[in-house]
Amino acid sequence: MAEWLTAARYPTSLEAVKNAGREIARLVEASVAATEKTIALLAVILGDYPDFEFERAFVSGHVAKVRADPRIARILKRALPSPDRAGGAGAPAIGEIAARTAAFTTFE
């Protein structure tokens, strides 16, 4: 995961991935603001994990902005024809993607 994020221009150490996997490092639902940087990172995540249930990560009032972003809209259109994003088999649960939390929270 560290290599994958680093290759996607989100420098991440193996230690950061290990630390993010700890119980206390869980992503707090509805805590990520929709900014250019968080949406760009989400596009990277959805590029490999199109069923990732990102809506739970973002502040509820920001989800429409995220969905309206052309990068995200394009990925969602290819991934699921339905607007209901139920998360398919193999989609990482929000708790399983904790290493990406570190990348979200480093953007101010």
Image (spheres, grey):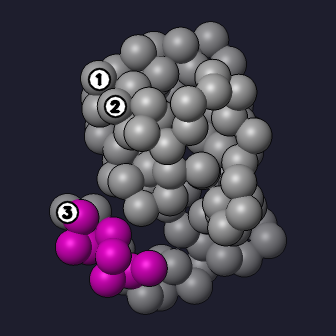
| Residue located beneath label 2 in the image | 74
| Residue located beneath label 1 in the image | 70
Across and down, in percent, residue 95 comes to 74, 61
Q: Secondary structure at mark 1?
A: helix
Q: Secondary structure at mark 3?
A: loop
Residue 108, quarter of the rendered image: top left
Assess whether mark 1 and mark 3 are in contact (beta carbons under 8 angstroms). no
Across and down, in percent, residue 18 comes to 57, 85
Residue 40 visible: yes
Q: Is residue 47 left or right of residue 10?
A: right
Q: Which residues are magenta?
A: 1-8
Where residue 38 is drawn, which disc sits there?
none
Image vertical order of residue 3 relative to residue 56, above or below: below
Does the magenta run of residues contain 38? no
In the rendered image, the residue lying farthest to the right is 23
Q: Secondary structure at mark 2?
A: helix
Image vertical order of residue 47 relative to residue 31, above or below: below
